Image: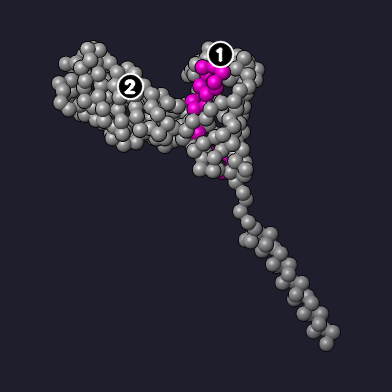
Amino acid sequence: MQNRSLFRSLAAAIGGFALALLSGCGTVNPNMAVGTALSGNWSFASANNAAILNTGFTQGAYETVSAVARLNGVSCVSPSTDILLTGSVTATNQMTLVSAPFSGTVLTLKGDVAADGKGIADASWNFAGGNCAALGSASVTATAYSNIAGTYTGSFTDAGGNPLAVSAFLQETTQPNQDGQFSLSGTASFPPNTCFVDQPTMTQSMVTGNLLSMTYTDPGSGAVLTASGTFNSAATQLTISSWSIAGGSCDGDSGTGTLTE
């Protein structure tokens, strides 16, 4: 009887030990809490000066966040300088990003990320040391820009006030390039006009913050149309502040325009 009781005690102990091992392997552990993911094309702007930080998030999944930004409207750094930012969004959606040094300056960017990842409240930046230290600390407005995607129609108007009808299909990339900028693909038609022989195709483009630029080439005549401007955060209206044509029958034409989705 004593041997049988001892056997039962040993069996119960072994079973409990095995269950503890299985639990330790994570089979019943809850998932780790993580913050909202960040992605896409953003800008951060201060009311105190003309500085605008255009930012493309290259990785924003869970707690690890990285982005590439460029600073515009200031003289302390070239607008073509890539500012590399890394950091995290905590389980309570508090974002902190810190840059690698650029021109001797380190930038810290903070804010509270919205649950849907499309807004950042109470955002602030701090520039410490180096050429841009004078920008200091400030509250900033964070704006997320929707992807430009769809058919946009409107007109380009030349210097003489003559309208040129435009219809353009545009599709923006979902991921930025190594400089934190996005690009466009698509075609455009200009019915009816004599400026182009064939349907011009996008050959070069750039989207960063609310800025965009596009270059179209007509394969039939070789004419090249370049256009640049801004767009609203919903990406439903493109305001072309400048366009011009080089080559073809409309060589030298230029003006402004508006396109609406």
In this rendering, the answer to whether 225 lies above or below 65 is above
Residue 42 percent location from the top left of the image: 48, 30
Q: How is the image coloured?
A: one colour
Quarter of the image with the C terminus is: top left
Residue sitting nearer the eye, 63 or 100: 63
The magenta stretch spans residue 44: yes
Residue 215 in sight? no
- The image's mark for residue 240 is 2
Residue at image x 58%, y 20%? 102
Please tell me how crowded label 1 is: few (under 14), some (14-19), or many (20+) other residues with Cα within 10 Å: some
Left or right of residue 75, residue 160 in this image:
left
| Most distant residue in the bottom direction | 1
Residue 23 percent location from the top left of the image: 67, 62
- The total of numbered circles placed on residues is 2
In the rendered structure, which amino acid carries the disc numbered 2? Ile
Residue 173 percent location from the top left of the image: 39, 35
Residue at image x 52%, y 14%? 74
Q: Name the element at disc 1.
A: loop
The magenta stretch spans residue 74: no
**Mark 1 in CB contact with mark 2 (< 8 angstroms):** no
Residue at image x 61%, y 23%? 138
Work out how far the residue at label 1 is from the one at label 2, CA to CA, in angstroms.
28 Å
Query: Which is closer to the viewer, label 1 or label 2?
Result: 2
Q: Name the element at disc 2.
A: strand
What are the residue bounds of the magenta stretch? Answer: 43-65
- The image's mark for residue 76 is 1
Left or right of residue 156, residue 210 in this image:
right
Residue 206 percent location from the top left of the image: 38, 26
- Of the image marks 1 and 2, the number of the one nearer the N terminus: 1
Residue at image x 36%, y 21%? 229
Residue 161 in sight? yes
- The image's mark for residue 206 is none
